[in-house]
Amino acid sequence: MIALLVRDIRLAMRAGGGFGLGLAFFLIAVVLVPFGVGPEGGLLGTIAPGILWIAALLACLLSLDRIFTLDYEDGSLDLLATSPLPMEGVVAMKALAHWLTTGLPLTIAAPVLGLLLNLPESAYYWLVVTFLLGTPALSFIGTFGAALTVGVKRGGLLLSLLVLPLYIPSLTFGAEALRRGAEGMANTVPLLMLAGITLGTIALLPFVAAQAIRINLR
Amino acid sequence: MELEVADLACARGGVLVLEGVNFRLEAGEALMLRGPNGIGKTTLLRTLAGLQPPLAGRIGMADEALAYGAHADGLKSTLTALENLRFWARVHGTGEGEIGRALEEFNLADLAGRPAHSLSAGQKRRLGLARLLLTGRAIWALDEPTVSLDAESVRLFARAVERHLAGGGMALMATHIDLGLAARALDLTPFRADPDRAGKAGAGGADGAGAGRVRVPHDPFAGAEDLA
């Protein structure tokens, strides 16, 4: 299974692999906000947690349909399904590879972009914490959506429609925990909810997604 | 080691295409699946590979004994030939030494460092076939393995199959060309499902396979002949 993880990361890093895609989108989306909203520091600082979370979510969405579609088209998914690897493990490794090439770079880039949004100083710690706790859920939910739509020609739109509503809890609790943390309020409850969603998706969705793929391969 | 298929019925896209398929394959044997386009050769192979469940019947073989080779080779175009094979070797837990042998066997050693997208169609196919050697599995179930291979590569492939059979392996191939192997042929035409019964197939597949329907008894190997 480690072989699959290594292969997916290597494929993402190679030309045309889409490694920088999500990161570049995140960068551009966040950089555009100050231009659109205006340079007023107070307002920017207030909306920064929400903007960062929404931009991260959309950046994550961009690369989702690559997770299984490419393997489906070149036949690797059939071969993986007949290999000794359990499909649940394949799904979990794919989601992990997606997080390592999307969620983790976003987490690292977010504090830098926080500067542009005049994010309060107290918020940087919580920004990294909420991203680390929340973005794995985005990858696992997205992998589940990708599994449902594998085999659908140009299923990107369908995938977005399926996945975006499922991202709402992570967005709500992630942005809320960040906002409260930035303002020095207690944010244990939203943080725990965020972590709970992430752990729940990691525990359950690989099984559901594996079943969806088995059905889609028939 | 053997593969036994008894009274198998399989469907494609919800439509019953084959029923009552019976055959048996012993170690060292090869079987060529024959039949016109659309008869269900690919469907049968996918069912045997476990990619879709059979509607009825039984497939008797050891777990994880079958290596499936589809129309698509499952190659990653940005990885080199060697990296592609190394991935599948690691997935199947095969040693590094086997990779060199597989490259050698399909005359790919000179191309090992080339990215798969720069290979020709025939070279890609050879790389896809080399993967079979790394699965370490006894039954090769291959769908049109010789597509886009030139005469020399077909001979390479036939030799690889012969060696596999000599080592106690089995091969099941849907192919239209003569590989020069001593293999039986199984024509799937007699197993074509009656489309009128297709609607009922999903519900009552096992109980009434053939019940109430006049069916000409046939020996699945009646038309079999030694192709060599």
Image (cartoon, helix red, strand yellow):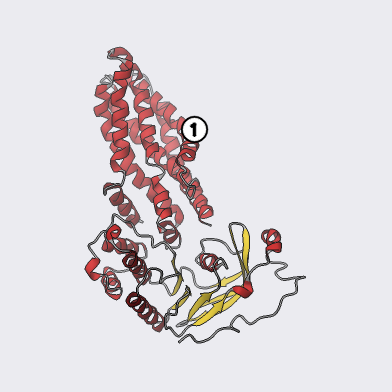
The residue positioned 45% from the left and 59% from the top of the image is A78
Q: Is residue B20 visible?
A: no
Tell whether B54 sits left or right of A15: right
Tell whether B16 sits left or right of B51: right
Tell me if residue B171 comes above or below residue A103 in the rendering: below
Q: Quadrant of residue B21?
A: bottom right
The subunit letter for the residue under badge 1 reads: A
Give the structural element (helix, strand or loop) at label 1: helix
The location of residue A152, given as percent across then percent down, is 49, 47
Identity, as a three-letter code, of the amino acid under mark 1: Pro
Q: Quadrant of residue B215?
A: bottom right
The location of residue A173, given as percent across then percent down, is 43, 28
Q: Residues within 10 Å of mark 1 (few under 14, many from 20)?
A: few
The residue positioned 45% from the left and 33% from the top of the image is A167
Q: Is residue B101 visible?
A: yes
Rendered-image quadrant of the C terminus of chain B: bottom left
Tell whether B201 sits left or right of A169: right
Which residue extends farthest right? B212
The location of residue A121, given as percent across then percent down, is 25, 20
The residue positioned 35% from the left and 79% from the top of the image is B155
The residue positioned 46% from the left and 34% from the top of the image is A164
A212 or B224: which is nearer to us?
B224
Give the residue pinned by disc 1: A165
